[in-house]
Image (cartoon, rainbow, N blue to C red):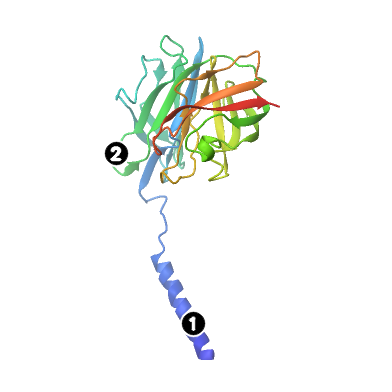
Amino acid sequence: MKNISKFLFAFLAIALIGCEEDLVIYDNVNGPALVAFSNSSFDLEIEIDATGSVTVPVNVSTISDMDRTFNIEVSQDPEENTLVDMSVMIPSTVTIPANSYTGEVVITGQDVPGVDTAVETVVLRIEDGAGFSVGQPTTINVFQVCPIPADYMVGDYSLFNLSGVVGPGNGTENFESGTVTLSVGSSPSQRVFSAAIYPGFRPTAVNNTINLVCGNLVLGQTGPSPALGCTATPLLFGPATNQTTYDLSDDTNIIVAYNEDIDGSCGGPFANQAILLQKL
C-alpha cells in the first residue's frame, strides 16, 4: 500500500511539472498588441440648434512607457457612411498615453441641415500598422435630440411584449416581462432599464437604452442575447425601421418599436417588433 502511495505521489509530481512547462503566460509588455474600439457602436446626440459630443474609448492589450498613436480610418463606403455633410468632426488619430491601456477619441457634431431625427451612421476602423493587430470597427450613430424634462419617463413601469419573432411563444418573451425601472442614462434624452433578452434561454439581465429623439423613441442596439438553436451567434436588437413616438404631456403608456435580429443571424432582421411600458 505504501509503494502504491509513493507511485501516485511521483506521478502527480511529474504531471504538475509537465503542466507548468506547458503553461503560457501572456506578456503585457513585449507580447503582441491588439488595438480595438471598446464597443461596436456609440451614439452621438446633437441637440437641436446646438452641439453634441461622444467619447469613444480605444483599448490596447499591451502597455508601454511611451505614448502610442494610431490612425483612425473613416469609411467612405456609402453603405457604411451616410453622413450628408461635414457636421461631424472625427479626429484622424487616437493616442494611448504612456503606462495606459486606453485612449479616447472625442467626436463632436453641430446641428446643421441634414442632421435630424433620421439616424445617420459612419463606421470607424483602426488603420493597420506594423507591430500590432486591429480589432472590430465601431459604428457612430448620429441623430438630433430635443430637450427632455428630467422626470419624464422615469420610475417603475410594467413591461409587456407586444410582438416578436424568434423568442419563445412566437416572440412573446423577447424581453423579460414584469416591472422595470427607467432612469436617465448617459444623456438627458436617454432612458435606461435592465431586463433579460430571451429570458427563456438566458435569464441574465442586460442594460437596454431608449433614446428620445425629437418625438421618436429609438431603441439603442442591445444585447447580446444567448446563442439560440438557429445560430451560434448572439442575436441583437436595434432601432426600428418605423419609429414609435412619445408625447411630453403623457408618459403613462409608452410603446417602443425595435428591429429584432438586426444582423440576420436567425433569418432577420425582423422589422418593427414592440414592447409596451406602462407606468405604475
Q: Residues within 10 Å of mark 2 (few under 14, many from 20)?
A: few
* Residue name at image x 65 percent, y 13 percent: 249
Q: x, y (%) of residue 84?
A: 36, 15
* Residue name at image x 56 percent, y 37 percent: 173
The amino acid marked with disc number 1 is Leu
Query: Which residue has dot 1 on it?
Result: 8
Helix, strand or loop status at disc 2: loop
Q: In the rendering, which numbered label is found on residue 52?
A: none
Is any part of residue 50 visible from this angle?
yes
Foreground pick, 234 / 78: 234
Q: x, y (%) of residue 180?
A: 65, 33
Foreground pick, 270 / 44: 270
Query: Which residue has dot 2 on it?
Result: 129
| Most distant residue in the front direction | 169
Instruction: Give residue 233's quadrant in the image.
Output: top left
Question: How many numbered marks are there?
Answer: 2
Q: x, y (%) of residue 194?
A: 60, 35
Asked if 79 appears above or below 64 in the picture, the reply is above
Helix, strand or loop status at disc 1: helix
Which label's residue is closer to the chain start, 1 or 2? 1
Asked if 163 appears above or below 50 in the picture, the reply is below
The amino acid marked with disc number 2 is Gly
Instruction: Give residue 93's quadrant in the image.
Output: top left
Q: Residues within 10 Å of mark 1 (few under 14, many from 20)?
A: few
Q: Please state which of the two labelled residues, at mark 1 or mark 2, is closer to the viewer.
A: 1
| Most distant residue in the right direction | 280
Asked if 108 appears above or below 32 in the picture, the reply is above
